[in-house]
Image (tube, rainbow, N blue to C red):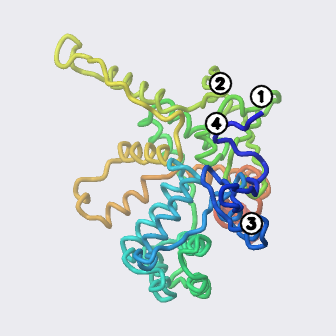
Amino acid sequence: MARRSGSRGRSAPKYRLHKKTNQAVVTVNGSDFYLGKYDSPKSHQRYKQVIADHWNPPGANLKPTVPKANDGPTTITNLAVEFAKKTIAKHSKESNEWKYQVKPVLKEIRETYGHLSASEFGPIRFENFRQTLVSRGLCRQVVRRKSTYVVQMFRLGVKLELIKPELLQRLLAVGPVEMTQQLKKKRWSVDLDLVKATQAELTPVLADMVEVQRLIGARPTELCKMRPVDIDRTGEIWIYSPTSHKTQHHGHSRRISIGPKAQAVLKRYLLRDPQAFCFTPSEAFNQHLERRKESRVTPHNEGNRPKQRKQTTFKPCYDQNSYRRAIERACLRANPIPEDIKDDDAKVKEWKSKYVWKPNQLRKSAATEARKTMDLETAQLVLGHASKRTTERFYAELDNERAIEFARKHG
């Protein structure tokens, strides 16, 4: 049976005789390549080269780059464009990896050094770029991650034969980033009264998300992607196994225990399609409209009357950024910035540090409570850390009350 047009078999295209010219020929992806005199050593060598260059087995997506004489040297912009294509193909254009990690770095380096050729971007300019990130107050881990994207961009340029390997070696020789000041990365727990005040300003869906996260210590992404099908409800304590999580690529598993208090909140979100997400923006938006309708002071027979709204499209679930923004806005509604400091950026920043909290601080509160009532290992299991050192360093505060009690009795 003849092979369908456009299909690709497992074997490479065949070496054939072109009878009219007595040459060897091979057809790759619809194009004919003449290889020279049939059955000559040179034609067989040329056949292998054509197959290697133009017939890519499934999974390969690279083609040899042949620079044109009038193109000029490869610039930083050229490398950034190629690296953007690779990242989008791997993670998609809507992924957090592209939107919030790679894209900002490529935008910044193109705006600063995009007009330079790759050979002009040496160790000194690379170090200047990294120190610019340090001067913004970014921690070592963030600076290292952003600078790694630049190195990966040059590595791809070498792979595509756009630049010489020596240009990549120069950047690799720079070594670790030097921090003029090492900022201590610490996530402080949030006061329960402040959480309750914020919840009063949120829609019921978001308020319940905050309550569940505070009780189980899940990461924001794990909470946002929660579905009924992912929760094992056979035992007294439910077990939630996220389909994806932060350390999945390291081969670690993640099991989150859900106790009676969190179960009471979650029950009303489990009576839906098992494959659907528990917390949806569309449901929260409808609750927002209902709240506005109930708080209306003007009689319904006066003033503006309800109109048919334009159909709004929502994502199937919250993500960590939309969830965080909703909480930050509710914090400012619960504790508005005083009028007398609105024009002073330093005072506004100080005000926000006191009254605006982030979802990860709820994990901090859960970890601290777990360590206080149980031990450090329990806090590690609650947070899903592979190392106790991570739990102790970034999340679970020491229980100073025990030391005070000891001093009261024995000091």
> Regarding mark 3 in the picture, which secondary structure is present there?
helix
Which residue is pictured at 72% across the width and 65% down the height? 47
Tell me, for residue 48, which label it has, or none.
3
Using a 10 Å C-alpha cutoff, classify the residue at mark 2 as few (fewer than 14 neighbours), some (14 to 19) or many (20 or more): some
Residue beneath the point at 64% across and 29% down: 266
Of residues 6 and 32, the one nearer the viewer is 32
- Residue 391 appears at what percent x and percent y? 70, 61
What secondary structure is marked by label 4? loop
Residue 371 visible: no
Which of 237/338 is in front?
237
At mark 1, the secondary structure is: loop
Crowding around mark 4 (Cα neighbors within 10 Å: few <14, some 14 to 19, many 20+) is many
Q: Disc 1, disc 3: CB below 8 Å?
A: no
State which mark lies toward you, 3 or 2.
3
Neighbours of disc 1 within 10 Å: few (<14), some (14-19), many (20+)? some
Measured Cα–Cα span from mark 4 to mark 2: 10 Å
The number of numbered badges drawn on the structure is 4
Q: Nearer the viewer, residue 285 or 167?
A: 167
Question: Disc 4 or 3, which lies upstream in sequence?
Answer: 3
Q: Tell me the kind of residue under disc 1.
A: Arg
Q: Which mark is residue 233?
A: 1
The percent coordinates of residue 256 (x first, y second) are 73, 43
Question: Pointer 1 and pointer 2: residues touching (CB < 8 Å)?
Answer: yes
Q: Nearer the viewer, mark 1 or mark 3?
A: 3
Position above or below: 73 against 237? below
What residue is disc 2 on?
270
- Of the residues shown, which amino acid type is indicated by label 4? Met
Q: Secondary structure at mark 2?
A: loop
In the picture of the structure, the residue carrying the numbered disc 4 is: 226
Extreme residue in the front direction: 20
Reply above or below: 399 against 286.
below
